[in-house]
Image: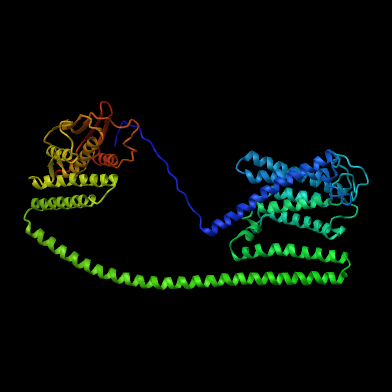
Amino acid sequence: MKTSETTTSTADFKETGDPPHEKMRYDRISLLKSISQIIAIIVAIIGFLILFGWAFNIPMFKSPGPAFSTVKSNVGLAFIAIGISLWIFQIQRENKWVHIIAQIFSVLAIILGCAIMLEYFFNLNLGIDQMMFREAKGALLTYTPNRMAFTAALNISLLGLALLSMDQKTKGGYRVSQALAIISGFLSLLSLLGYVYGVQLLYYIPNYTSISIYAAFTFFLMAVAVLFAQPDKGPMGVITSDYFGGYLARRLIPVAIIIPIFFGELAILGQYAGFYGGNFSVSLVVISTTIIFILVIWWNSLSFNWMDIKRERAEIELKRYKDNLEIMVQEKTAELTSTNLELEDEVKERKSAEEELKKSLGEKELLMKEIHHRVKNNLMVIYSLLNLQSRYIKDKETKDIFQESQRRARSMALIHELLYQSQQHNEVDFGSYIHTISTELFRNYSLNSEQVKLNLKTEDIMLDVNTAVPLGLIVNELVSNSMKHAFPDEREGEIDIRFFKEDDNYVLVVKDDGVGMPPDLDINTTETLGLQVVDSLITQIHGDLKLIREGGTTFQISFREPDFRNK
């Protein structure tokens, strides 16, 4: 359909929900990612505190006490770099330049760690140990003043590489970053256990600088943060999964780490206190951890047994439902079979009746008249049913919708009534139709003839039924629209309806001098059902619409009738 009005479009959206178990895993993953971000910030803050301690000579920020080696200033610098890098990686990955900044921090950390290791391997002094702050010679467990431990340099390199390879994985699907983080975490944990158990060899290598307890603890935190940064991938994906393997891992891994450390420390404290000797201490650790692990395994076995019981119950319930469903299907199938047989008999009866009807009709015109008569009657039955149903409707908007449907059914029924009364079985006097339908609508809307005048000027034009039906619906919609909306608050006015032939075109004009349509309304995109129907029907008859908004509202529709009269 052609029109001079502009078109608009609307957009909508949908909300979707996840299954409960998927939401639980999503919440679990989100929590671990949040923890990773927090740890990254904490690591960077620790780095700043270390540098602050060196800048203002605050001993507490460099070591817990005089019996502990100090954390070196370059370690604080590395903590700032890897902490910021991981934090940026977590909060923003779509922005290319921000991602590059995170990679630069990681590369700087790797360069620093590798440079320190080169100094150890080749006994060099690259001048980077005291480039920020100087440390006096003879510091506790320090090979060269202010040079970080070899283990610290190795951890910095491992964590820097882990941050650079966040999106990398092997052919087997293993995450490179998580493997490097696990190695770093293991080395850091060894150093921490050395401090906890008083085993110097675990955190200090002779002729090398000792790793400080601050550095060991922070490296362990950073390794955990890297693992938590991608909790749904690699080894962490197994732990956070909703399968039995993930459920078991989340229960056993913390126990496997904490229990041996706890009982080991407990045994050492008892040995230092003189309660027992070394052999008894080892026996105590073995027995205690064995008992705890047996209890944990037993507890998990109970949990898995309960899960199996619930699964078996669910399977039994599912089987019962399946059996009931099969019975219901069989019953419904029998009912459908019976109904189909009844329908077949009814179809046979109707076919027989149709054959008898065809035989009794001698001419094609009589048959067409009978068809139009039946269609008209069926439409009037629909009209009557809608009328009866609308009496029980209290809501005005719903009742209006029913009444609009009644009028549409009546407009189509009137076409077939005129065809039934006409000498032509496929053509209708459309001028007469306009007079009849307009008068009925005027009466249905209970308009006061003194308030609103109806002016009709139509030519006697015969239209094919294929054109008359959609054009009749158009007349119904446009005239109803004017009567319903053009004259609110008892406003006076006129409705003009004209139908004439101009050259090879037929022209229908429906005009009112009422309040007019909203200036932003577009018939092509309106959500009003009546105007949508008009738009669709104009397209059906291959017509053109001209909408005039001055002095009220004027719809002018022009079309050519297809040449199917002789078909």
Give x and y (percent) for residue 504: 18, 33
Q: Quadrant of residue 566?
A: top left
Q: Is residue 517 left or right of residue 262?
A: left
400 horizontally vs 426: left or right: right
Image quarter for residue 59?
top right
In which quadrant of the rendered image does the N terminus lie? top left
Q: Horizontal and vertical percent for residue 251?
A: 66, 64
Q: Residue at x 71, y 64 (%)?
A: 255
Q: Does residue 162 appear in this view?
A: yes
Question: Residue 472: x percent and y percent?
Answer: 19, 41
Query: Is residue 567 something that shows in the picture?
Result: no
Q: Residue at x 27, y 26 (%)?
A: 550
In front: 225, or 362?
A: 225
Residue 147, position in %: x, y? 86, 45
Q: Nearer the viewer, residue 83 or 452?
A: 452
Identify the residue shown where x is 71% and y is 70%. Answer: 293
Instruction: Look at the picture and state if 105 lies above or below 261.
Output: above
Which color mode does the image show? Answer: rainbow
Horizontal side of residue 69 vs 385, given as left or right: right
107 above or below 204?
Answer: above
Can you tell which quarter of the image residue 427 is in?
Answer: top left
